[in-house]
Image (tube, rainbow, N blue to C red):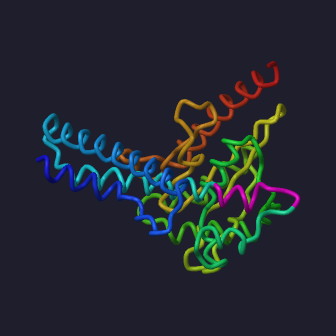
């Protein structure tokens, strides 16, 4: 399918704008250099798309479309991380919503909803920094309200264990924090309880208790990281019943693992 591959490559690498009639020699040299680079990228892409078609019997247009979508998804994620860093990790003064909105070509209010707690955790892990957003632990009444809201949003067998899991966390030394509101529209605000625990040699871990009976670290933490934790209570993906006692036992084993990790950190 050479014609389709060539056409898709042409769409992915469009030619530079023609020069005005009064362009000088320097502008012409730059234009020729840019044109040569675009044509080279176009030829390379067309060759790669033909290989995809002949080797894997994969339609070149669909393959290219999937690539662009994955690139867009990755770019959107990088934007969320940059905004999270700019708003919550830069001190003494974070970047303003107005300054970020200009570069993002959105309204300043949209900047507040451009990232969430998962992005904040990824930034903290990548940079070794902690968010500058100050939080107070949830008082007993606030925690009770948060748990009641999680129960309301958790369907099926997980609902009956929401409060029990929270009590297990409290007994094992975890401190509850209410969610940080990062969007001006309460309809789209994230619902969760953030549970934090600190170890003697500087290890700080946040677990997120979320609707649908989930308790765990942020999604992008690698499962082989000793700080990683993830449990679904109620009925898990394999159809097994997971109770409050199961979660409490898993938390105790997890705390032992993190304690060992923290001690190694202290010896380093």
**Toward the viewer: 92 or 178?**
92
Residue at the limit of the structure toward the right, as seen here: 92
> Magenta span covers which residues?
82-92
Residue 133: image location, x then y, percent: 79, 61
Horizontal side of 153 relative to 189 (left or right) equals left
How many labels, in total?
0
Residue 23: image location, x then y, percent: 50, 64
* Position above or below: 23 against 66: below
The quadrant in which residue 180 appears is: bottom right
* Position above or below: 152 against 68: below
The quadrant in which residue 127 appears is: top right
Position of the C terminus by quadrant: top right
Horizontal side of 99 relative to 77 (left or right) equals right
**Toward the viewer: 159 or 185?**
185
Q: Residue at x 83, y 61 (%)?
A: 134
Q: Residue at x 79, y 41 (%)?
A: 198
Residue 221: image location, x then y, percent: 57, 41
Q: Residue at x 30, y 44 (%)?
A: 45
SS majority, magenta: helix
Residue 114: image location, x then y, percent: 59, 67
**Toward the viewer: 6 or 55?**
6
**Toward the viewer: 227 or 59?**
59
Residue 9 forms part of the magenta stretch: no
Residue 86 forms part of the magenta stretch: yes
């Amino acid at each position: 399918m050479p014609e389709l591959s060539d056409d898709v490559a042409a769409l992915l690498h469009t030619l530079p704008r023609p020069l005005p009639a009064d362009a000088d020699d320097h502008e012409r040299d730059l234009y020729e250099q840019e044109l040569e680079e675009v044509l080279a990228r176009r030829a390379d892409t067309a060759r790669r798309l033909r290989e995809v078609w002949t080797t894997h019997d994969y339609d070149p247009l669909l393959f290219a479309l999937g690539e662009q979508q994955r690139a867009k998804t990755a770019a959107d994620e990088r934007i969320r991380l940059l905004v999270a860093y700019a708003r919550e990790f830069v001190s003494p003064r974070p970047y303003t919503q107005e300054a970020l909105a200009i570069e993002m070509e959105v309204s300043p209010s949209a900047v507040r909803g451009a990232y969430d707690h998962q992005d904040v955790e990824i930034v903290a892990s990548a940079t070794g920094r902690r968010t500058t957003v100050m939080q107070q632990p949830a008082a007993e009444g606030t925690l009770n309200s948060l748990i009641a809201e999680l129960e309301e949003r958790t369907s099926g067998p997980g609902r009956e264990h929401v409060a029990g899991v929270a009590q297990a966390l409290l007994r094992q030394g975890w401190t509850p924090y209410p969610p940080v509101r990062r969007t001006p529209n309460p309809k789209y605000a994230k619902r969760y309880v953030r549970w934090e625990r600190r170890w003697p040699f500087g290890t700080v871990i946040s677990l997120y208790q979320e609707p649908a009976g989930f308790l765990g670290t942020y999604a992008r933490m690698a499962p082989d990281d000793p700080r990683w934790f993830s449990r679904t209570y109620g009925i898990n993906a394999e159809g097994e019943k997971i109770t409050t006692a199961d979660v409490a036992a898993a938390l105790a084993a997890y705390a032992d693992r993190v304690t060992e990790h923290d001690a190694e950190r202290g010896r380093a």
